[in-house]
Amino acid sequence: MRRARVFAPATIGNVGPGFDVLGLAIDGLGDTVEVRLDVKENEVIVTGRDALLVPKSMTKNAAAIAARAYLAKKGYKGGVRIYVLKGLPMSGGLGGSAASSVGGALAAAIALDEPYTDDDVLLAALRGEAAVAGTHFDNLAPCLYGGLTCVLPAIGKGAPRVCRIGVHRDWWVALVSPSHQLETRRARAVLPKQMKTQQWVEQMARTTALAYAFAAGDVSLARHALVDRFAETARAKLIPSFAKVKKAAEKAGAIGASISGAGPSVFALCEDMMTASKAARAMQDAFGKVESTAHVGRIDKLGARKVQH
């Protein structure tokens, strides 16, 4: 039996102003996917966080869709058994579907034990992500590559161009997830269809400046650039007490804070672990009676990788 197990980290999509373009991988939190080949029957087994809510069908589970897409392209026609250990919440804004998709595609590639390319893995992972959250790469890319990534749309039917942006400083991230779910499709439905020219220019400038701030380790610039007038403005009403939560993070010393992906999780970018821990506690307090979970971690610079069985 050929098999492989992969850990795929949590990710923050958008990273403030970089809607559908920037993505950031977070250490210590993610999904683990194992793919076993040469089995008699196809099967998906899901355990872990929100496991009861995750589809078990081979045609509906993100990890299974991605794994089978990769294997089909390589001509494999045998049975596939997939084990998914969820560390990420369902519809939580932490790239849960992307982690399962990348994990499934990469585990399938490693299990097959043939040469593979990142583009092949990324496009197979997109099949799983598209079935759950839509066709976008801002979570997939950082999950696969690690660190901060910028995605340029593909030309034709090829893979998009992924720019890996070096992170100069050892910044930390505080993530707080309220207990309720927010589906990506619902969060996208509230976005404005158009922006005024000046607003678009400002958004583009902030996105560019934020990417440079990560690369240069410029705290002052990151604080100025980590402002989102597009998605955050529209989605804030979908997250209970968001304004208070964001203000609490900034008051605790965070460089800045915004919605993680489509939400409802909120992230705060911080200079060190102590500040991140303080920000996480303040954000949870600001959610008030709404139950929440918190995670504090470094930026994951490795991305999805093989782990031992």
Image (cartoon, helix red, strand yellow):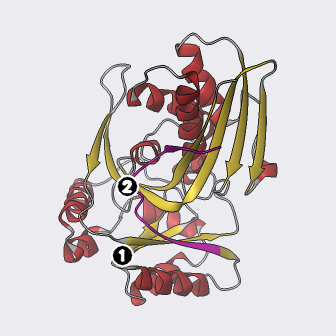
Q: Residues within 10 Å of mark 1 (few under 14, many from 20)?
A: many
Of the 4 image quadrants, the one containing the N terminus is: top right
On screen, residue 259 versus residue 57, left or right, reads left
Residue at (59, 74) in percent of width and height: 294
Nearer to us of marks 1 and 2 is: 2
Give the quarter of the image for residue 39: top right
Is residue 69 or residue 260 the one in the foreground?
69
Amino acid type of the residue that numbered disc 2 sits on in the rendered structure: Lys
Residue at (49, 44) in percent of width and height: 305
Numbered-mark total: 2
Is residue 297 or residue 160 the one in the foreground?
297
First to last magenta residue range? 293-309
The residue labelled by disc 2 is 301
Is residue 206 or residue 139 the one in the foreground?
139
Labels 1 and 2: the sequence-earlier one: 1
Residue 105 appears in view: yes
Q: Position of residue 306 (x, y in %)?
A: 53, 42
